[in-house]
Amino acid sequence: MPAPNLTVVLDREQLRDVTLNDDELMREALGALIDDTTRQIPLLQAAIRAGDAPATLRLAHYSKGACANLGAKAAAATLLHIERSAASGDFTGCAGSLANLAAEIERLRAEEIPG
């Protein structure tokens, strides 16, 4: 089995599978994911700034799971990097990845679901 391409912004096949190929549900799920992940960014930023590894890990893990479930692969990979950086105490790395996460959310926002 080939390794997944984690630079893919949105794995549409995975999103289709999760939403049973319902375009309206795809739009709703993707919109909710974008909104929720956007709300997590300031919380992550505060945890990173405070050097709070447990909070950073918890927040990143929560958002990573949501992104991975819906096929937002690049955002999930960025959140995984935040998790790993926090686990090793590298909050500079966390901050850099957080900036990348904001960019990935904007790329995700640009994805259009037909319908």
Image (tube, grey):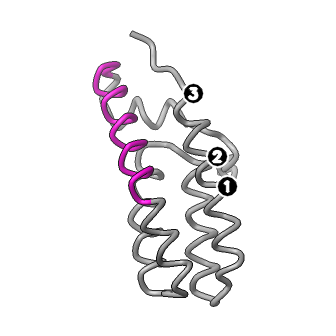
Q: In the structure shown, which secondary structural element does the residue marked by tag 1 occupy?
A: helix
Q: Which mark is residue 111?
A: none
Q: Which residue is mark 2?
A: 103
Q: Amino acid at mark 1?
A: Asn
Viewport quadrant of the C terminus: top left
Please indicate whether residue 84 sits to the left or right of residue 36 in the image: right
Q: Residues within 10 Å of mark 3 (few under 14, many from 20)?
A: few
Q: Which mark is residue 100?
A: 1
Q: Residue at x 65, y 49 (%)?
A: 4
In reply to whether residue 89 is colored magenta, the answer given is no
Q: Position of residue 111 (x, y in %)?
A: 55, 26
State which quadrant residue 83 falls in.
bottom right
Q: Position of residue 68 (x, y in %)?
A: 47, 52
Q: Identify which residue, 43 or 87, lies in the foreground.
A: 43
Find the magenta span and give its range: 22-40
Q: Residues within 10 Å of mark 1 (few under 14, many from 20)?
A: some
Q: Residue at x 52, y 69 (%)?
A: 45
Please indicate whether residue 57 sits to the left or right of residue 4 in the image: left
Q: Please say if 12 is above or below 50.
A: above
Q: Are marks 2 and 1 in contact (CB under 8 Å)?
A: yes
Q: Which residue is mark 3?
A: 110
Q: Amino acid at mark 3?
A: Ala
Please indicate whether residue 23 sits to the left or right of residue 5 in the image: left
Q: Residue at x 51, y 20 (%)?
A: 112
Q: Amino acid at mark 2?
A: Ala
